[in-house]
Image: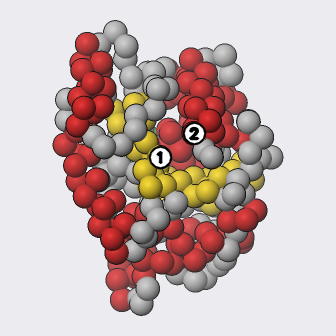
């Protein structure tokens, strides 16, 4: 195994980090060995799981100062490790420009530990710059969180284009895992309309499981925990366990 999944959408604030943290945690609860790689200089996935940066960050790996093994940190869950990031990663965007094979730096690093995990989840930043291109080049598949709102579909076109370019140039095997409706509010007619629109207009599968808006999901990163560890009885915890179960049922 060792399947590598990028959580990506260049639109900001759509639930990428929330999905990365809680989907990774749910897979770990289901007894899979999981590594979450933070590929966002905001470092929200790292702080959201209470991970310190003492061992170094993904910036140190990209700039060849450390190996990915050096920087991997444990979490409350023995099945979940994190390769953290911080604001330094912004610098890598510039430093990579002059390197040969610059799109493959992250792939080479992750491939070296791939066999130690069942799933490697990457939390991407809201841009399609060289770091995100590195993530999409390293990935076996992409999971796309989408917020059920009016402009959701505009961003999807650009992301689809980028994925197609990566497939033809850097990573022919890249697939799309599916679209995940995040921050869903079933009381809103608009939420349901957006789902119908996405199903009609996108070539990608849409997960049956939707992530409902839930205050426990927003609170849990402040405690440095996934929502499952923070409040296992919450609807947020239930939704992410359901997502992981649906995801596993779709793997062959
Ligand atoms: N299902 C949910 N219920 C309640 N709040 C949520 C939910 N999903 C996400 N949020 C909140 O919405 C905000 C944006 O979510 P998140 O940080 O996951 O988005 P993102 O796509 O990673 O953002 P960025 O593009 O900046 O990386 C956060 O404050 C998060 O706590
Ligand atoms: Mg984020």
Please name the residue shown 50% across and 62% down the image.
Answer: 139
Q: To which quarter of the image does residue 245 belong?
A: top right
- In this rendering, the count of numbered labels is 2
Of all residues, the one furthest to the top in this rendering is 187
On screen, residue 80 versus residue 242, left or right, reads right
Q: Badge 1, how many Cα within 10 Å: few under 14, some, many 20+?
A: many
Do we see residue 76 in this rendering?
no
Q: Which residue is mark 2?
A: 250
Q: Which residue is mark 1?
A: 177
116 over 212 or under it: above or below? below
Q: To which quarter of the image does residue 191 belong?
A: top left
Nearer to me, 205 or 96: 205
212 over 125 or under it: above or below? above
Please name the residue shown 62% across and 46% down the image.
Answer: 252
Nearer to me, 85 or 77: 77
- Residue 194 at x, y = what percent? 26, 26
- Quick check: marks 2 and 1 in contact, CB under 8 Å? yes
**In this figure, which colouring scheme has been used for the structure?**
secondary structure
Q: Badge 2, how many Cα within 10 Å: few under 14, some, many 20+?
A: few
Which comes before the other along the chain, label 2 or label 1?
A: 1
Of all residues, the one furthest to the front in this rendering is 252
- Residue 231 at x, y = what percent? 66, 22
In front of the other: label 2 or label 1?
A: 2
- Label 1 SS: strand
């Amino acid at each position: 195994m060792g399947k590598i999944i990028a959580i990506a959408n260049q639109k900001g604030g759509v639930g990428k980090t929330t999905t990365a943290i809680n989907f990774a945690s749910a897979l770990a609860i289901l007894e899979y060995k999981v590594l979450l790689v933070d590929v966002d200089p905001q470092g929200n996935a790292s702080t959201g799981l209470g991970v310190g940066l003492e061992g170094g960050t993904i910036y140190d790996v990209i700039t060849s100062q450390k190996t990915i093994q050096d920087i991997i940190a444990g979490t409350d869950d023995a099945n979940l490790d994190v390769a953290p990031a911080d604001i330094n990663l912004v610098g890598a965007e510039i430093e990579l420009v002059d390197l040969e094979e610059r799109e493959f730096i992250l792939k080479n690093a992750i491939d070296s530990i791939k066999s130690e995990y069942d799933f490697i989840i990457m939390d991407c930043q809201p841009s399609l710059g060289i770091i995100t291109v590195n993530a999409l080049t390293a990935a076996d598949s992409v999971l796309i969180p989408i917020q059920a709102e009016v402009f959701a579909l505009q961003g999807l076109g650009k992301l689809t284009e980028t994925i197609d370019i990566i497939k033809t140039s850097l990573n022919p095997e890249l697939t799309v895992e599916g679209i995940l409706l995040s921050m869903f509010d079933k009381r809103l007619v608009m939420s349901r309309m957006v789902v119908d629109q996405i199903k009609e207009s996108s070539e990608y599968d849409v997960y049956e499981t939707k992530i409902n808006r839930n205050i426990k999901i927003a609170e849990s990163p402040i405690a440095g925990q996934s929502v499952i560890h923070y409040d296992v009885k919450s609807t947020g915890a239930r939704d992410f366990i359901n997502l992981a179960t649906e995801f596993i049922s779709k793997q062959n």
